[in-house]
Image (cartoon, rainbow, N blue to C red):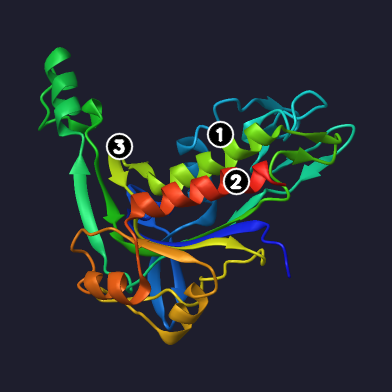
Amino acid sequence: MSRKNSVTLTVVANMTSNYSEGLGNIASVQKVYTKGRVHAMRSRESMKNALMVSSGMYDDLQTKVDGATQKMVDKDVNAATCRALEGGYMSTGKITYIRKSSFYMTDAIACESFVNETRFHNNLYLATNYANANNINLQENAKATGLMPYQYEYDKSLKIYSITIDLDMIGKDENFEAQASTEEKIYRVNAILSAVENLSLTVKGNLDNAEPIFVVGGFSDRKTHYFENVVEVKGNKLLISPDLKDRLSKGYNCGVLKSGIFSNENEIQNEMKASSIAKFFDNLRKEVTEYFANN
């Protein structure tokens, strides 16, 4: 029987997209073409950075500039001793060290195709304040006050993403033959899980609650996003497909937030035996603690 040595989750969350290219004073959200349509998204890089920050794993991050700005790595500061390096690194210098991330993410892709909602803003208050302080007529000489209109696309929608944690890699750095303690490994995995459970993002100066509305997964003997292809949302319903139920029956669990976002919340609870989101993560963190204590 294969050993379960990874944790895999697929999450549905109501979150904003991140921004990519801009044209003048116009900012556009990142998008991807999939399923024959254009969908807004939050990139895996943005998701990973948000989790590292939210989990506190970047609190001990040290950087250096050596041809390029990069994470500080040496025999004393490595993935075993520095939590910020758990997400992987490439350190170049006299010797190049590469250590892959111990967890992997997908892009968070919107469930529905993109509908452009443009928001228009300006800095009129600041420009007026400057004009009054410097005795400038704002209407006659707006340029001198720095008055500038700007606009950006806005998207907040249900998005699906997956994360898989390789438990064999947690706290280990083969470049320096170093390994963190069992307690430290438990802390790191549970910190990442807690960040997923309570994820919030700061977008354009606004706080965005990106907590899970639905989550499915658990311990797995496959280091892959096991539920990535079977979690789908149509309109305001989570599709309870035979494939989703079949995979769920192989030792996995799921949780749903009773918030009214899904119109079929009762079906999810009854047919899939879904717990609350809080209970799902509490049980998973407990399993993580037991896993490392016994391995």
Structural crowding at the residue carrying mark 1, measured as other residues with C-alpha within 10 Å and reported as few (<14), some (14–19) or many (≥20)? many
The quadrant where residue 117 appears: bottom left
Q: Which mark is residue 290?
A: 2
Residue 52 in the image: state x and y as whole percent.
Answer: 53, 39
**Earlier-in-chain disc, 1 versus 2:** 1
Q: Which mark is residue 110?
A: none
> Residue 179: where, in percent of width, then height?
77, 35
Report if the CB atoms under discs 1 and 2 are less than 8 Å apart.
no
Residue matched to label 3:
205
Going by the image, does 85 lie left or right of 152?
right
What residue do we see at 51% from left, 71% from top? 227
In the rendered image, residue 34, in percent from the top left (x then y), is placed at 46, 77
Considering every residue shown, the one lying at the far bottom of the view is 242
Q: Which residue is mark 1?
A: 57
Going by the numbered disc 1, the residue's amino acid type is: Met
- Three-letter amino acid code at disc 3? Gly
